[in-house]
Image (spheres, rainbow, N blue to C red):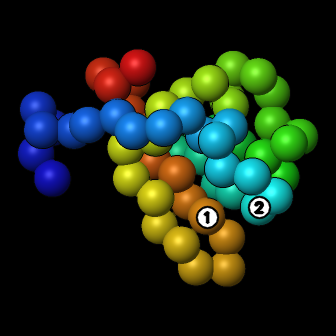
Amino acid sequence: MEENNKKAYLQVGSIRLYNIVVNYDGNEIYRGKVEDAPEEIRQLKYSKVNISNEIVCEVYSECQ
């Protein structure tokens, strides 16, 4: 995906009852239950989600 074509979708906090990993600009910033994440993490809008044993949310600063 090209840098200038990234889109933001829903907030990370809209995902419920799952363990998640949040990567911000390629760096892991949170791992755990959505409900236990700090409010500033839950407010981030994800651009990509990968689902395996856990949900990995890719977040990009340019989309916030």
Instruction: Please tell me how crowded label 1 is: few (under 14), some (14-19), or many (20+) other residues with Cα within 10 Å.
Output: some
Write the residue at 71% across / 43% down.
30
Disc 2 + disc 1, Cβ < 8 Å: yes
Q: Is tag 2's residue or tag 1's residue first in the polypeptide sequence?
A: 2
Q: Quadrant of residue 38 in the image?
A: top right
In the image, residue 7 lies at what x, y percent? 26, 37
- Residue 15 picture location, percent across and down: 66, 50
Image point 11% across, 32% down: which residue?
4
* Label of residue 43 in the image: none
Q: Which residue is mark 2?
A: 18
- Label 2: which secondary element: loop
Please state which amino acid type lies under the numbered disc 1: Ile
Residue type beneath disc 2: Tyr
Q: Which residue bears the numbered disc 1?
A: 55
**Taking 50 as reference, is 44 above or below it?**
above
> Disc 2 and disc 1: Cα gap in Å?
7 Å
Q: Is residue 5 visible?
A: yes
Placement of 64 over or under 52, stated as above or below: above
Q: Quadrant of residue 59?
A: top left
Give x and y (percent) for residue 20: 69, 56
